[in-house]
């Protein structure tokens, strides 16, 4: 597979990353995942804007964000994925610095890595709906930054897989935040509710696209705190992410959602979303 590492396109097995890379030692870096649908990176500008936000928040000086679009397009071409549905993964760490110390100096040169990989749309999950669990959110308080420090996500997802669940959504003291890899929305009386943006959730690009789509379709939306004890009031729940698009939830923490099948608003939104790419 051809990947892009620092300044060049190389075969993946030719990439060498120092054990002193701060990404390896401190999870000191950020990443992005972008959907590629045949001939088009979906919402690329929004993803790159979020990447820049993360770089700024972490004080990583990486000045080549403008070149990323061309690099990704070249990766698609070199890996013969032009006609496929794929994802692009981008990771930027603060770079290699020795001796190991927590504080960083500003001369460190960031490490940049990008690859693309075929990833078909998960029609099974999207058509039939999924079961999800609920856990307490034990992450730090800057979940608005898409950092590579993902241990709480890894551990929650592993428990999900062991229980045959598609996803875990988290709550902080009874207030829903988001999923391990998704944002979440709830529907009652045709109104779409989703947790409001703050430092405790990732500003998902799919979430933003879905809210915009709702407005354009005349579907009412509300961004507000959503509490665990109101879950039973909602008729529909769906997950949103770059890879899951709009995936309806049919069971949450063992309780059936609505009629136990994907709801009509979720299905309608899913169809309209697909027209965007
Ligand atoms: N929330 C978290 C914690 C995520 O990791 C992701 C995506 O990976 C999302 C939400 C969804 O974000 P996006 O729609 O930008 O893929």
Image (spheres, rainbow, N blue to C red):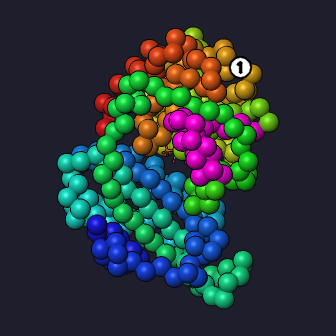
Q: Is residue 67 left or right of residue 56?
A: left
- Residue 17 point in image, percent of width and height: 48, 79
Determine whether 197 is above or below 262 in the image.
below
- Residue 227 point in image, percent of width and height: 73, 26
Tell me what residue is drawn at x 31 percent, y 30 percent: 275
- Residue 202 point in image, percent of width and height: 60, 46
Q: Is residue 54 left or right of residue 205?
A: right
The residue lying toward the viewer, choosing from 233 and 195, is 233
Question: Which quadrant of the rendered structure holds the C terminus?
Answer: top left
Q: Is residue 236 left or right of residue 4?
A: right
Tell me what residue is drawn at x 41 percent, y 31 percent: 125
**Can residue 189 be seen from the camera position used here?**
yes
* Quarter occupied by residue 231: top right
Determine whether 260 is above or below 142 in the image.
above
**Can residue 44 be seen from the camera position used here?**
no
Read off the magenta span: 152-172
Tell me what residue is drawn at x 57 percent, y 31 percent: 132
Tell me what residue is drawn at x 58 percent, y 73 percent: 24
Q: Is residue 124 left or right of residue 218?
A: left
- Point out the residue furthest to the bottom here: 99
Q: Which residue is mark 1?
A: 230
The 10 Å Cα crowd at callout 1, few under 14, some 14 to 19, many 20 or more, is: few
């Amino acid at each position: 597979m051809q990947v892009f590492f620092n300044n060049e396109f190389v075969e993946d097995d030719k990439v060498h990353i120092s054990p002193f890379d701060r990404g390896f030692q401190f999870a000191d870096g950020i990443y992005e995942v972008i959907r590629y649908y045949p001939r088009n990176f979906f919402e690329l500008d929004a993803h790159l804007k979020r990447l820049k936000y993360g770089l700024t928040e972490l004080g990583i000086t990486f000045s080549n964000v403008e070149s990323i679009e061309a690099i990704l397009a070249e990766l698609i071409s070199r890996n013969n994925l032009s006609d496929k549905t794929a994802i692009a993964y981008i990771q930027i760490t603060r770079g290699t610095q020795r001796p190991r110390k927590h504080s960083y100096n500003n001369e460190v040169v960031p490490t940049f890595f990008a690859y693309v990989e075929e990833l078909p749309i998960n029609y099974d999950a999207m058509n039939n709906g999924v079961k999800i669990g609920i856990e307490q959110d034990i992450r730090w308080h800057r979940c608005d930054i898409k950092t590579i420090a993902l241990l709480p996500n890894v551990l929650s997802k592993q428990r999900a897989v062991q229980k045959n669940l598609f996803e875990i959504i988290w709550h902080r003291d009874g207030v829903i935040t988001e999923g391990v890899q998704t944002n979440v929305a709830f529907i009652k009386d045709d109104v779409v509710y989703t947790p409001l943006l703050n430092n405790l959730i990732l500003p998902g690009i799919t979430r933003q696209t879905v809210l915009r789509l709702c407005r354009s379709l005349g579907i009412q939306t509300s961004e507000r705190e959503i509490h665990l004890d109101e879950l039973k009031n909602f008729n529909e729940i769906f997950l949103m992410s770059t890879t899951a698009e709009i995936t309806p939830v049919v069971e949450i923490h063992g309780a059936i959602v609505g009629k136990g099948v994907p709801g009509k608003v979720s299905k309608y939104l899913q169809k309209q979303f697909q027209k965007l790419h």
